[in-house]
Image (cartoon, grey):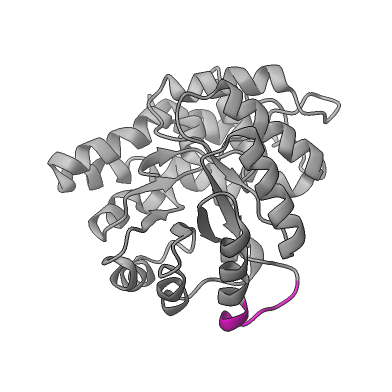
Amino acid sequence: MEGVGPPLVTPFDRNGDVDHERLRELVTWVEGRGVDFIVPCGSNGEAELMTAAERAAVVETVVDEASVPVLAGTGHPGKRETLEATEAAAEAGADAALVVTPFYFSHDQDTLARYYEDLADASPLPVYLYSVPAYTGVRLLPDTVGRLAAHPNVVGMKDSHASIAEFVRTHRRVQDREFDLMIGSASVLAQALDAGAVGGVLALANLAPASTADVLEAHREDPARARERNAELVELNTAVTAEYGVPGLKWAMRERGAPAGHPRSPHTAIDAEAKERLRSLLGDLD
């Protein structure tokens, strides 16, 4: 995968059920605004709040509707359920699997490496690593990523640690391999591209897909201009990730006409103050 891909939000109706009609509309909405691939069942898709059957159905709907590649989130705390989800994604027609680090229990780096190697041996899809310590409490260190990049079925990584220094260290360990190193934060997309990223899996690409794609396009011709454009997105990106999370992201998407649906419990709707701040940031974006 290269370019910009949204970790696609999952539209739920007011009863908390997956709204597959709106999900299809959302795929069309982001595709029409320049995304290069789509990532269902990631963190912003509220995957951990869905059953295995719901996640499989979401991947199937996205694959059916999408004309760009689909990188399906299939990670669970253990290998058995992760492999089952990956096999279901393969049957649905996904192009690759995004596998978050095992969470809940603590694991050292050697255990994580062996987990991914065993999974990649058995996976019917190419495996992308996913390191998101803000949610899991564990990150894949550069040496571990370098070790895993040697596996023929481990083909890339979404790095959501957002440390450019560590991103550079990771890139140095994979740069001689066919390995798609992507950033997971739109706030540092241009800087990650400077450091060797091939693109990003970005929450903001749900809300402002054209703007995030513009950063990538500008970087090809003028990296300095790309950094300027990226800087204009940082406040909004921070608001819909660190400050207001998925409920804020979905509300802002609905404000811009995207069929985002509603968040699922235990998420709750944002308050009036948050809405006012987001309206201001959306106005700045326009």
Horizontal side of residue 276 vs 141, given as left or right? right
Residue 82: image location, x then y, percent: 70, 56
Magenta region: which residues? 105-111
Q: In this rendered view, identify the residue nearer to me: 222 or 155.
A: 155
Seen at 37% across and 28% down, the residue is 210
**Quadrant assignment for the N terminus:** top left
**As displayed, is residue 138 above or below residue 260?**
below
Residue 244 sits in quarter: top right
**As displayed, is residue 142 above or below residue 225?**
below
Q: In this rendered view, identify the residue nearer to me: 99 or 185.
A: 99
Residue 80: image location, x then y, percent: 76, 61
Q: Looking at this rendering, what residue extends furthest in the right direction?
A: 15
Q: In this rendered view, identify the residue nearer to me: 229 or 154.
A: 154
Horizontal side of residue 70 vs 192, given as left or right? right
**Quadrant assignment for the C terminus:** top left
Q: Is residue 106 magenta?
A: yes
Residue 212: image location, x then y, percent: 36, 37
Q: Is residue 259 visible?
A: no
Seen at 56% across and 51% down, the residue is 98
Residue 64 sits in quarter: top right
Seen at 28% across and 39% down, the residue is 215
Residue 262 sits in quarter: top right
Q: Is residue 59 visible?
A: yes
Residue 125: image location, x then y, percent: 55, 49
**As displayed, is residue 50 above or below residue 162?**
above
